[in-house]
Amino acid sequence: MSDVHTVAVFCGAHAGHDPIFRTAATELGRRMARAGMRLVYGGGRIGLMGALADGALAEGGQVIGVIPEFLTRWEVAHDGVTELVITDSMHSRKRHMFELSDAFVSLPGGLGTLDETIEIITWRQLKLHDKPILICDVAGSAAPLLAAIEAAIDSGFARPDSRDLFERTDGIAATIERLQHLRAANGGKAARL
């Protein structure tokens, strides 16, 4: 049985070209709510972020959106979430999401999603936390990110044990299954972030 109760999900403010991405985000939100997991995400109501939040809300889930004030218009802040936290910067957004969460899931997304995913992996590498990180591969979406990490290892810029800082999961069902069997880890040193 998992003691992971709150999960931060990083995902795109756009939906992407393939409808499978929106479907996957909605399904992750729905399944997290059914499993009794609270969702923490970037606070938008558009793109995959909106689909994720709407999926969780449709199943009665708790959803905390965390969004910097300047993005409330760009990413169109979701006014239907359980709680909307407005921060003063991108960094304070990421830090707040980190502090609230027991684990992290990365769905498909753009540069912001890649930034959040790499940063949370880097914080784990620096031993600032030991919280689980899952990269959910939806229809091969994780391949470029994983290839970049492998290239850094192959070039000698990252150690081979960097692969142990995260797990790749194959789709939404496998991600939920893994979340349900994870143990919460070291809460981390948020003061050092």
Image (cartoon, rainbow, N blue to C red):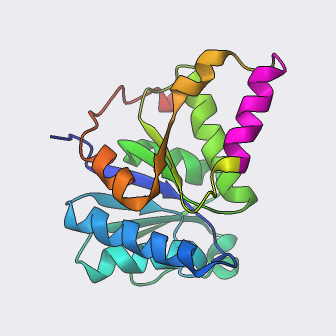
**Residue 69 sits above or below residue 189 on the image:** below
Look at the image and tell me whether residue 112 can be seen: yes
In percent of the image, x 33 and y 73: which residue is there?
Answer: 56
In percent of the image, x 39 and y 43: which residue is there?
Answer: 103
**Residue 60 sits above or below residue 106 on the image:** below
In percent of the image, x 61 and y 82: which residue is there?
Answer: 76
Q: Main secondary structure of the magenta part?
A: helix
Instruction: From the top left corner, tell me how far across and down residue 22 is, in percent.
Output: 53, 77
The quadrant in which the N terminus is found is top left
Look at the image and tell me whether residue 193 can be seen: no
The quadrant in which the C terminus is found is top right
Left or right of residue 158, residue 141 in this image: left
Can you tell which quarter of the image residue 146 is in? top right
Instruction: From the top left corner, tell me how far across and down residue 20 is, in percent.
Output: 54, 75
Q: Between residues 72 and 155, which one lies in front from this camera angle?
A: 155
Can you tell which quarter of the image residue 4 is in? top left
User: Does 31 lie within the magenta span?
Assistant: no
Residue most extreme to the right: 155
Left or right of residue 15, residue 60 in this image: left
Instruction: From the top left corner, tell me how far across and down residue 29 is, in percent.
Output: 37, 69
Instruction: From the top left corner, tell me how far across and down residue 158 is, in percent.
Output: 73, 20
Left or right of residue 57, residue 70 in this image: right
In percent of the image, x 22 and y 77: which residue is there?
Answer: 60
Q: Which residues are magenta?
A: 144-156
